[in-house]
Amino acid sequence: MPDDPADRLLGGSQSEKGIFVFRADLDAIDIKILRELQRDGRMTNVDLSARVGISAPPCLRRVRRLEEAGIIEGYTALLNGGSLGMDIVAFCLVGLKHQSESELRAFEASTGGWPLVRQAWMVSGDSDFLLQCVAKNLSVFQTFVIDVLAAHEQVDTVRTMLTIRQVKKVGLIEL
């Protein structure tokens, strides 16, 4: 049976019987824990254990195992940028002059020092990087693009896309 493209995104594959197999050693309870924590990472262990149908001590052990394995990378609060005066969300497609491993890594390191860049991906295709930027206003974003991003010695091209509104916001991994 051919793999479903969505399944490949999860880092696993489908068995001949159509059962999804993860790269990590996860059972149905682990998947439930991950789903629930992705929905609400702030819930107590007691609430989590009730939602997944096991008692609190083994639930906590499982969560710790998932953390130690790097499957759970951390916990964070999702903030409303507009409420905090951060009105601009934009994406920048960045093409570098050269794509050697050292040039790619150097640019990747540069993104770590740019507060407006909230997430960054190395991508394939016409561009080398996709940057998600959040700024107080259009002027601040434009200044960043012109004075920092486009002026960077490794950058050849920058294409920007301003967002109109977010229409979907869910956890990054569908389980």
Image (spheres, rainbow, N blue to C red):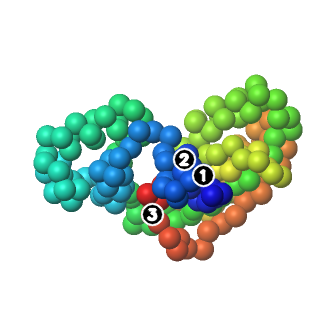
Residue found at x 60% / y 52%:
8
Mark 2 residue crowding within 10 angstroms, few (<14) / some (14–19) / many (20+) = some
Q: Amino acid at mark 3?
A: Val
Instruction: Identify the residue position indicated by label 1 in the image.
Output: 8
Whether tag 2 and tag 1 are in contact, CB under 8 A, the answer is yes
N-term mark: 1 or 3: 1
Residue 9 at x, y = what percent?
58, 52
Q: Amino acid at mark 2?
A: Gly
Residue 12 shows which numbered tag?
2
Instruction: Identify the residue position indicated by label 3 in the image.
Output: 170
In which quarter of the view is residue 154 placed?
Answer: top right
In the image: residue 123, left or right of residue 79: right
Pick the residue in front: 103 or 123.
Answer: 123
Residue found at x 71% / y 29%:
106
**Given the current orientation, which residue lies at the most extreme top position?**
102
Residue 67 shows which numbered tag?
none
Q: Amino acid at mark 1?
A: Arg
Can you say which quadrant of the picture contains the C terminus?
bottom left
In the image: residue 98, left or right of residue 74: right
Separation of marks 3 and 2 at Cα, in angstroms = 21 Å
In the image: residue 145, left or right of residue 40: right
Residue found at x 34% / y 38%:
66
Asked whether the viewer can see residue 150, the reply is no
Residue 142 at x, y = what percent?
68, 57
